Amino acid sequence: MEKIFFTYPGNEQISNDVCTICSGIKGEFQFHKFPDGETYIRIITDVKEKVCVIICSLHHPDDKILPLYYLCCLCKDLGARQVVLVAPYLAYMRQDKQFNPGEAVTSEYFASYISRFADKLVTVDPHLHRKHSLSELYSIPCEVIHAAPEISKWIKSNIRNPVLIGPDMESEQWVSAVAAKAGAAFTVLHKTRLGDREVEVSIPDIDKFSDHTPVLVDDIISTARTMVATVKQIKQLKLKPPVCIGVHAVFAGNAWEELKNSGVDKVVTSNTIAHSSNIINMARLIADVI
Ligand code: R5P
């Protein structure tokens, strides 16, 4: 079945790579914002009876979700057989329960909205915390790709004598798997989040690793407070400048500048969100499931 790949603006690099690996056809469409903020969309490529793959990373989701909905509806109206949404970064995974009376459980609302207009979802390491699987939220088939093997490979070939440091106790399983594949030691932070932009961390057993290169690994770098606080501790302990690795380069506000200037050796991310720190390419693994 022929596959047509539509690149939501801002996703060009990963989308081109996935399309090339899949030997797909690039879908041509016009996308325009009217002066009043409304969206115009026109698909030029014939999509009748085809599978349409739409690649759109969902950071800043509120700006994208309505145009994305229009694009998916239009594919269907023009006769597409199936619409596959590839969202290398999936948003709204944190508010998955009501913490206080009257709060919206946006994870559920977002999932039920997407499930209404896409036939299938492909994503990379969604932030599953209290939920065990996307099927608890989404009613369409979902494929989840893991960045861990690629991260391990990168660490193995680029860092001598690493010690991996995970962000919190919940990440222990993930970090230990990345460490095992990279042939590295690991520890996880004791972390307390005091607010949106305030965290306190301590690094257990780190004195055992004074001759190692600290490698901070996390699924999301958002405000970068977790990493910046850890880098501070590492500096105080007079360890080597750390390498910071994140799957999803969200970098809210001035998080990128703050992390870059905090005393790190380097920052490495995967290309689930286009950013100058992208080094780990997830295109091959995404193409494999498409
Ligand atoms: C938390 O559960 C995640 O694994 C990350 O540690 C968190 O999202 C990082 O957030 P920030 O960059 O805002 O500290």
Image (cartoon, helix red, strand yellow):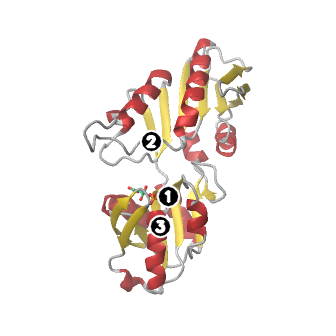
Question: Around disc 2, counting alpha carbons within 10 Å, would you say few (fewer than 14), some (14 to 19), or many (20 or more)?
Answer: some
Residue 287: image quadrant is top right
- Amino acid carrying mark 2 in the image: Val
- Amino acid carrying mark 1 in the image: Thr
Q: Distance between the residues labelled 2 and 1?
A: 24 Å
> Are circles 3 and 1 on residues that touch, CB within 8 Å?
no
The residue depicted at 39 percent of the width and 30 percent of the height is: 109
Q: In this view, does 93 lie to the left or right of 8?
A: left
Is 11 placed above or below 158 here? Answer: above
Q: Which residue lies furthest to the left in this view?
A: 101
User: Which quadrant, please, contains the C terminus?
Assistant: top right
Judging by the rendered image, the residue that carries numbered circle 3 is 227
Eye-nearest disc, 3 or 1: 1
Residue 238, horizontal then vertical, whole percent: 48, 87
Q: Residue furthest front?
A: 36
Residue 122, horizontal then vertical, whole percent: 50, 37
Q: How far apart are marks 2 and 3 (CA)?
A: 25 Å
Q: In this view, does 33 lie to the left or right of 223?
A: right
Q: Look at the numbered disc 2 and give the secondary structure of its residue.
A: strand
Is 247 placed above or below 8 here? Answer: below
Eye-nearest disc, 2 or 1: 1
Check residue 144 in the rendering and tell me which mark sits there, or answer none: 2
- Mark 1 Cβ inside 8 Å of ligand 1: yes
Eye-nearest disc, 2 or 3: 3
- Amino acid carrying mark 3 in the image: Met
Judging by the rendered image, the residue that carries numbered circle 1 is 223
User: Which quadrant, please, contains the N terminus?
Assistant: top right
Q: How far apart are marks 3 and 1 (CA)?
A: 9 Å
The residue depicted at 56 percent of the width and 67 percent of the height is: 259
In which of the image's four quarters is ligand 1 placed?
A: bottom left
Residue 53: image quadrant is top right
- Sooner in the amino-acid sequence: mark 2 or mark 3: 2
